Image: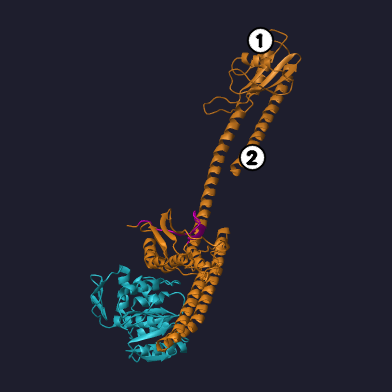
Chain colours: A orange, B cyan
Amino acid sequence: MAFAFGTGLAFSIVYLLVANAIQERSDAWLSGEAEVLARVSADTPKDHLYNRIVGEVAELATQELPDQRNASGQRLNSVFFLESNPNSNENPLWVGPGSYDAFLSAIQRTKFVPGIPQSITVEGWPTTFRVVARNENGRMIYMGLSNRGARHLLRTLTRRFLLLWGSTVLMGFLITYLSARRTLLRVQRITDTVAGIGSEDLGERLPEPINSDEISRLAKTFNHMLDRIQSSVNELRSVTDSIAHDLKSPLTSIRGALESALSSEPNEKWRDSVGDAIEGVDRLLSALDTTLDVAEAQAGALRLDRSMVDLSAAVQQLVNLYHPAMDERHHELVVDLEDHVVVDADWSLLNRVLSNLIENEIAHLPMGCQITIRLRSREGSAELVIEDNGPGFPPEISKRAFERFVRGKHSHGHGLGLAFVDAIARAHGGTAKISDGPAGGAVVTLSLPANVLHPA
Amino acid sequence: MRLLVVEDDVAIQAFLKRALVESGYQVDTANNAKTGELKALEGIYDAFIIDLGLPDLDGLDLIVRCRAQGISAPVLILSARRSVDERVRGLEQGGDDYLTKPFAIAELVARLRNLLRRSSPAQNDSVRLQAADLQLDLVRHEARRGEHLLQLTPQEFSLLEYLCRNAGRVVTRTMILDHVWQMRIDPSTNVVDVHIYRLRSKVDHNTPVPLIHTIRGVGYVLKHA
């Protein structure tokens, strides 16, 4: 754009300069010829031969210009010479194309300063004439030159320029478009590749071209960043693995020893205590596992074992499992599930998320509440809403409910439940939200990206 | 049945051995992969229990080596790793099984029994199960205690069937969730116990001899007093 404008401007300047130069040249020629003719006119006695002599000199002068003709053979340089005596009625001396009437009237309309060329418009002629006038002892000598030649030259110039300019600009556009497209395609490739690098597989890298333009540097920078992310993710995984290993091995032997004791201990009271200890170990291990899962999920280091999961069926199965437990607490359960809502998810983690959400309801609601579980597919996502008419979230936690170890004053949980739900939802590209219901109860909304809706 | 336990943690090795001997197996142990491989090559074992985190060699590589030398007895893999390795999953499909630490001995014994059953000629899957005076008709989905027909929901029937199949053996809550509901979750509420209470109230209602017993800290067992 700027290029087109710039070249256009440059051409305008050149055009004006050329037009000026041509005019100056023709003006100089006109003035010279007029002076020669004036001198001839002055030196020639005013007898019957006068008209012939001056006429012939003028004729010579008009033929002095190189004979420029256009395609149709018309002469482009029309020169005329006119000598008139305003004080007498004799016919003016005329050398030029056609009749002098139109020229004379055009000249009479114009005020001339002797020696300074002027432009006049002559009736019947498409282009203007440059005319220089001289006063030779009362006789007026006019020498005129049509601007047709100059105009023709300038037109040719303009046409050629426009052709050249047009093709240059077009070519410029084409080159710019192609190179921009190529650049954008490379950026697009980077975007696609980076978007495709999930938390499960951080091994993929962008191709690094050999040349070192900005895009290659971008690819390199991305690759460096991915290297760093991969190494910190690997580090986190090995840390969590070794924590898990170091804590689990002794806990396994504790648990095993307790279990052996349980089977060989005849005293009922002691057996109860040992049973309590085993349950304690199990709770500890469960909390440990969940903590590590949350830590990994939040760092994007959790390995997801994805498959197509029928969320409707999974929720229904959990409802079947938890229904009696809810009955015990006199909760009324309203289940409203859309069929075949399918998500691409880690089935086992998803089950834990769902059971966490339902257990939250069981653990925190007073007896005899109503719990509604609703599953809907919305544009590209599956939305699970669990709503109750209980007291809602305690104000002290509602803002931080998804943080680890945050729990209500009267909660008996380890405070990992919602943090786990949130972390796993995010790891799947979804969200978990809590809010207060219209009637004051708690509402938990879990959204997951749904890949296939309503399969056959 | 003779088993080889390859486990470097001495405490775990000890309680495993005791529990397995109590369950009626002959048990040998190895502390590392090298000894484990030497013993395995004797070819006298019906099954192996191998820990993945051995000091000298990864348990998986030990399994691969044994398999390469013609040892085909099933393997129960023990792992303290958090996520299940792809290769372990491959072995699982090949007929072996894995268990993550920590585990309940009851579950270990149950899985081991499964593995051994799979490797020996299949036994007839009966259409009837019986324990004491409890009878289950698996085709008609009917359960009777003595002459009395029990009114069970489908879930209760599945649960009773699972307990009945393992009559006399302890099943944990995790095992129940896994087999009856096909779920590997870790509930912190008494969700499984509620199902058991309900089932028990139907099965052991009005009888002097209860069949379903709670083993505190471990799970449940269906047995005749």
Which of the labelled discs sits on residue A10, or is there none?
2
Residue sitting nearer the eye, A165 or A92: A165
Q: In this view, does A324 lie above or below B106?
A: above
Residue sitting nearer the eye, B58 or B83: B83
Asked if the residue under mark 2 is in contact with the one under mark 1, i.e. CB atoms within 8 Å, the reply is no
User: SS class of the residue under badge 2?
Assistant: helix
**Residue at x 64%, y 39% (from the top left corner):** A10
The answer for which chain carries disc 2 is: A
Picture coordinates of residue A160, whole percent (x, y): 56, 37
| Label 1 in the same subunit as label 2 | yes
Residue sitting nearer the eye, A199 or A326: A326
Q: In which quarter of the image is the N terminus of chain A?
A: top right
Picture coordinates of residue A269, whole percent (x, y): 45, 85
Q: Identify which amino acid the numbered label 1 is placed on.
A: Asn
Q: What stretch is highlighted in magenta?
A: A429-454
Distance from the alpha carbon under mark 1 to that under mark 2: 50 Å
Q: Residues within 10 Å of mark 1 (few under 14, many from 20)?
A: few
The answer for which chain carries disc 1 is: A
Identify the residue at the far right of this view: A137
Residue A77 on the magenta segment: no
User: SS class of the residue under badge 1?
Assistant: loop
Q: Is residue A331 left or right of residue A96?
A: left
Which of the labelled discs sits on residue A91, or is there none?
1
